[in-house]
Image (cartoon, rainbow, N blue to C red):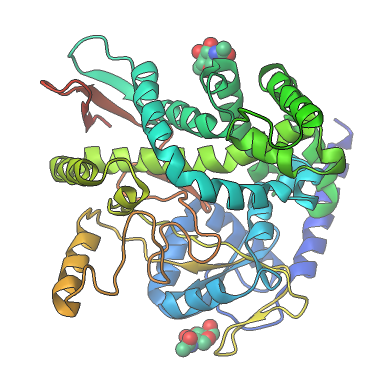
């Protein structure tokens, strides 16, 4: 306890040093806080509590501009409007880096491990192999989705049941992810599924804590806070033996052995080089990949369920639309492209400026090296599941082509449509809308404790009715 004042003094010095270190030398408007250290930290604290409101206010004040917000140890920059977004999407990876931006948010050096961030080969594996195979996986995903819903949300009779949305959706999404990543029967191993979920939750949770430390303290606290050892133990017990077996097969029969499964384990075994070619190293890449997939998809589907149950007038028309498209096209990629989604988040396209000379927008606005700029897409206050459908119809009439130049499909992106980010690294991500939303700084997501009532649809073999109880 005698060391408490010393620790407080050390923290004070650390905060002052990091304040001086990151003090901006240019004149982009700040939304809260200012150049003097006291108001800077008060601003950072306000942002921690009211981040979403502050960003929303900045959006209305600077519709086509760039502004910055104080975080505990740095300024973050937000670039508004389609023009800035298009310029950010067009910048190359060695100027604006998606990877380093995401690693900053996940504090991946400490939550996952330096080997993952120093040699992110698994990201190339995902981009090439998963993208190539995604159409082929849709029937399997559909199969797994049906089984997972039956297992996770077991509804014995025809009565209404109350369910916790987020934990159940995480179980469903973990199953779907596992079907592609590790295949049957492992994808139904409850111990592995629990690990996938707890690792994901722990990476995001710990990252928020580690981010509060100045960089020179991160290696110490990062290691103390890491769940790596216990996670790896469960990983080696559940998926370790299968990885080991795949490695042995390649050693014995070469890379194209007969009946080689088409899943993430095989792709990683094919791509891993040198010291990465071991079962624990490959297991770690699978956990790291799980994190991105499970977090983003479970947040998205939870938000969608909150939206649908809060605004139930959308349920029937959207179900009819889905049934019509699937009847005509089956569970195919083009069918999924024809479904629609809604939602948007405040920080949709994080990048980190990695070019030594910083990044300059075409109008001269300068963002320095090491900074995270984010384009901001308006967070509509009112849920309207038909907004994009109406606009598409309008443009179809105007341009005389299907949807005209306007392509707001479920998985398309554009400079004015950042639901999934935009550019090469676009992906389905954490999006918010409706009234069941929590916000703490920019950690924004659907309420993790939200519940809905759900029951089987009468006269339908599979299908559910649901409405919101919160
Ligand atoms: C140019 O940058 C400034 C600085 O933030 C901004 O306020 C302004 O709106 C920008 N103009 C255009 C046309 O992008
Ligand atoms: C998985 O997690 C659930 C919910 O936390 C728990 O009830 C169950 O016992 C766990 N199963 C295994 C095999 O660890």
What residue is drawn where x is 60% and y is 52%? 128
Is residue 175 shown to the viewer in this render? yes
What residue is drawn where x is 34% and y is 18%? 150
The single residue placed furthest to the bottom in the displayed view is 363
Q: Where is residue 238 in the image (x, y as percent from the top left)?
A: 66, 18
- Numbered disc total: 0
Is residue 30 shown to the viewer in this render? no
Q: Where is residue 243 in the image (x, y as percent from the top left)?
A: 71, 26
Q: In which quarter of the image is the C terminus?
A: top left
- Seen from the viewer's position, the closer of residues 284 and 19 is 284
- Seen from the viewer's position, the closer of residues 333 and 285 is 333
Q: In which quarter of the image is the N terminus?
A: top right
Q: With 265 as the anchor, is 12 left or right in this view?
A: right
> In the image, is residue 331 above or below residue 249?
below
Q: Where is residue 230 in the image (x, y as percent from the top left)?
A: 74, 22
Q: With 437 as the anchor, is 1 left or right in this view?
A: right
> In the image, is residue 336 above or below residue 421?
above
Q: With 297 as the anchor, is 105 left or right in this view?
A: right
Q: In which quarter of the image is residue 70?
A: bottom right
Q: Position of residue 403 (x, y in %)?
A: 23, 68
> In the image, is residue 282 above or below residue 18?
above
Q: In which quarter of the image is residue 393?
A: bottom left
What residue is drawn where x is 54% and y is 18%? 185
The single residue placed furthest to the top in the displayed view is 156
> In the image, is residue 425 above or below residue 168?
below
- Seen from the viewer's position, the closer of residues 191 and 215 is 191
What residue is drawn where x is 53% and y is 41%? 293
């Amino acid at each position: 306890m005698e060391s408490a004042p010393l620790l407080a003094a050390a923290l004070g010095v650390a905060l002052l040093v990091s304040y001086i270190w990151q003090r901006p030398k240019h004149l982009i408007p700040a939304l809260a806080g200012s150049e003097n250290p006291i108001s800077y930290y008060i601003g950072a604290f306000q942002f921690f509590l009211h981040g979403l409101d502050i960003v929303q206010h900045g959006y209305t004040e600077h519709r086509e501009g760039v502004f910055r917000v104080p975080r505990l140890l740095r300024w973050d920059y937000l670039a508004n409007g389609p023009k800035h977004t298009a310029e950010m999407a067009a910048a190359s990876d060695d100027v604006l880096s998606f990877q380093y931006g995401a690693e900053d948010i996940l504090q991946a050096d400490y939550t996952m491990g330096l080997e993952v961030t120093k040699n992110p080969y698994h990201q190339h594996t995902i981009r090439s192999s998963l993208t190539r195979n995604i159409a082929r996986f849709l029937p399997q995903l559909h199969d797994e989705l049906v089984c997972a819903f039956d297992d996770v949300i077991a509804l014995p009779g025809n009565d209404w049941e109350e369910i916790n949305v987020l934990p159940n959706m995480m179980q469903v999404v973990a199953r779907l992810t596992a079907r592609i990543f590790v295949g049957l029967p492992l994808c139904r191993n409850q111990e592995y599924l629990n690990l996938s979920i707890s690792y994901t939750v722990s990476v995001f949770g710990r990252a928020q804590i580690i981010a509060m430390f100045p960089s020179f303290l991160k290696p110490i606290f990062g290691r103390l806070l890491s769940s790596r050892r216990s996670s790896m133990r469960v990983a080696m017990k559940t998926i370790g033996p299968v990885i080991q077996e795949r490695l042995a097969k390649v050693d014995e029969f070469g890379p194209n052995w007969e009946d080689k499964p088409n899943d993430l384990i095989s792709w990683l075994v094919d791509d891993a080089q040198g010291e990465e070619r071991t079962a624990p190293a490959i297991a770690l890449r699978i956990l790291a990949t799980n994190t991105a997939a499970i977090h983003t998809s479970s947040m998205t589907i939870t938000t969608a369920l909150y939206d649908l149950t809060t605004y139930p007038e959308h349920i029937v028309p959207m179900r009819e639309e889905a049934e019509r498209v699937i009847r005509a096209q089956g569970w195919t990629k083009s069918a999924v492209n024809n479904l629609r989604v809604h939602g948007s988040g405040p920080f949709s396209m994080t990048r980190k400026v990695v070019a030594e000379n910083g990044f300059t927008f075409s109008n001269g606005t300068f963002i320095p090296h090491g900074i995270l700029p984010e384009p901001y897409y308006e967070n509509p206050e009112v849920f309207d599941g038909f907004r994009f459908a109406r606009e598409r119809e309008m443009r179809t009439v105007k341009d005389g082509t299907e949807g005209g130049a306007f392509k707001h499909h479920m998985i398309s992106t554009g400079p004015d449509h950042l639901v999934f980010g935009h550019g090469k690294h676009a992906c389905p991500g954490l999006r918010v809308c409706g009234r069941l939303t929590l916000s703490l700084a920019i950690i924004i997501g659907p309420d993790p404790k939200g519940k809905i009532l759900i029951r089987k649809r009468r006269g339908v073999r599979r299908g559910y009715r649901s409405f919101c109880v919160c």
